[in-house]
Image (spheres, rainbow, N blue to C red):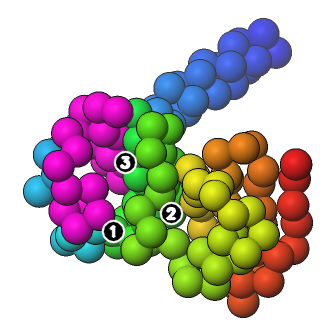
């Protein structure tokens, strides 16, 4: 029984260790869509790290901003610590809502998945939109 438990613990440890197998890469090794998004929206920012993960890519800039992409090069998360999410990447309906209800606030993080968008503002407010851009939750 002890051997079996030890084996199980070892397998779990190995699986957890392998889950973080990030591989540093060059931008040109990323999908073309990701390269184009970076060139168009983050031009002039220096890249500190680009890496490939098992099913995604990530780019971290020297100012702390970060963009995560899916395996096809579509952005999944944009996090801007020192700036705002580039306006061209914010869906128009979300931009209008933020300007209307939170005038003067910056969008510092934008996440999306199949069902929703999550927006973080510079004052800590988090707004969740469904895929039709209707507000479904606000955390103050």
Marks 1 & 2, CB-CB < 8 Å contact: no
Q: In the drawing, what numbered circle is on residue 76?
A: 2
Indicate left or right for 13 with 103 as reference.
Answer: left
Q: CA distance from mark 1 to mark 2?
A: 9 Å
Q: Which residue is mark 3?
A: 58
Residue 16 found in image quarter = top right
Q: Which residue is mark 1?
A: 73
Marks 3 & 2, CB-CB < 8 Å contact: no
Indicate left or right for 113 with 59 as reference.
Answer: right
Q: Residue at x 64, y 80 (%)?
A: 96
- Quadrant of the rendering where the N terminus is positioned: top right
Q: Work out whether mark 3 precedes mark 2 in sequence or the reverse, and give the earlier one.
A: 3
Mark 2, secondary structure of its residue: strand
Q: Residue at x 55, y 33 (%)?
A: 15
Indicate left or right for 61 with 1 as reference.
Answer: left
What span is colored magenta in the figure?
Answer: 38-63
Q: Work out whether mark 3 precedes mark 1 in sequence or the reverse, and give the earlier one.
A: 3
- Foreground residue, 119 or 57? 119
Query: Which residue is situated farthest in the bottom direction here?
Result: 132
Camera sees residue 33: yes
- Foreground residue, 138 or 60? 138
């Amino acid at each position: 029984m002890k051997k079996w438990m030890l084996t199980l613990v070892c397998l779990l440890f190995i699986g957890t260790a392998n889950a973080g197998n990030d591989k540093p890469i060059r931008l040109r090794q990323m999908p073309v869509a990701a390269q184009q998004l970076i060139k168009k929206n983050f031009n002039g920012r220096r890249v500190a790290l680009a890496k490939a993960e098992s099913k995604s890519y990530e780019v971290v800039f020297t100012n702390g901003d970060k963009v995560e992409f899916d395996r096809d090069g579509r952005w999944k998360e944009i996090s801007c610590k020192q700036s705002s999410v580039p306006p061209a990447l914010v869906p128009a309906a979300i931009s209008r809502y933020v300007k209307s209800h939170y005038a003067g606030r910056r969008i510092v993080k934008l996440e999306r998945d199949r069902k929703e968008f999550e927006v973080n503002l510079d004052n800590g407010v988090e707004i969740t939109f469904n895929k039709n851009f209707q507000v479904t939750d606000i955390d103050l």
